[in-house]
Image: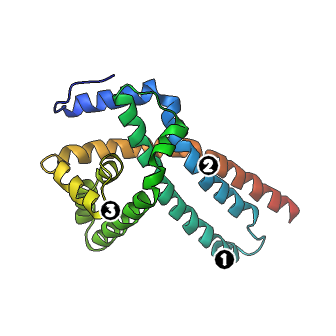
Amino acid sequence: MTTALRPLSTGELLDRTFALYRNHFGLFLGIFAIPHLFVLAFQCLGVAVEPNGAPLANLLARLPWIYGAGFLTWIFSAVSQAATVMAVSQLHLDRPTSVLDSYSRVKKHLLGVIGLSLVVGFAVGFACLGLIVPGIMLLVMWSLAVQAKVLEDKGVFEAMTRSSDLTRGRRWRIFVIWILFVLLAIVVGQLLQWPISLAAGVSGNVMLQRV
């Protein structure tokens, strides 16, 4: 699958990306799913220990689990992104890879990737407090920071600077592609999250029957 390195149009980039994911669907599904299984287990635990009481009390008891699941999703998304970057790199070089191999190759970068995700997340979130647009601009500008961290072994702030350099002059295209992939990620995420919704519904029915 080795290809000549040249600038690609947005259509060519999307076509090659979807072809890569389609041809190696099981690999990328495994990379995405494994970390989120921990989030799913955490959410199931929250459902299992939810007290049977007034709605307000249930809400207060549920809040730590909601925030905890959000934080874990944030962290594990960064980890799975790093593993995905490594898998794509190996496939582009026509080298065999697997889910475990992809995670094994990024294990030395895990703390850096998590730190990078937290720094970028807080910076973007702070920029969004006043106006949404500056936060989106920062998110696009640093959209290649994980790739720079993993593939070029950069430090956290070096990776952010490298991403800013790489995206300069191409940020509108990156924004359009990013929107498409966010929509795709939402669809895939919902497919993987339906078991917790089903579990929550079953748990709720059991509690109502007990009452």
Q: Amino acid at mark 1?
A: Leu
Q: How many numbered marks does the figure carry?
A: 3
Q: Position of residue 198 (x, y in %)?
A: 69, 48
Please name the amino acid that badge 3 sits on. Val
Q: Residue at x 50, y 54 (%)?
A: 76
Q: Are marks 1 and 3 in contact (CB under 8 Å)?
A: no
Residue at 22% x, 54% y is 162
> Coloring scheme of the render?
rainbow
* Mark 2–mark 1 CB contact (< 8 Å): no
Mark 1 crowdedness (10 Å alpha carbons): few <14, some 14-19, many ≥20: few
The secondary structure type at the circle numbered 3 is: helix
Residue identifier under label 3: 156
Type of residue at label 2? Answer: Leu
Q: Position of residue 90 (x, y in %)?
A: 39, 33
SS class, disc 1: helix
Q: Of label 1 and label 3, which has the lower sequence position?
A: 1
Q: In this picture, is 26 found above or below 34?
A: above
Q: Of the two numbered discs 2 and 3 on the same chain, state the one appearing first in sequence.
A: 2
Callout in the foreground (1, 3): 3
Residue on which disc 1 sits:
56
The location of residue 1, given as percent across then percent down, is 34, 22
Q: CA distance from mark 1 to mark 3?
A: 41 Å
Splitting the image into 4 quarters, where does residue 9 fall?
Answer: top left
User: Which residue in the protein does label 2 denote?
Assistant: 37
Q: Residue at x 46, y 56 (%)?
A: 110
Instruction: Using the rendered view, name the quadrant where residue 204 is placed.
Output: bottom right
Residue located farthest toward the left when viewing the structure as drawn:
169
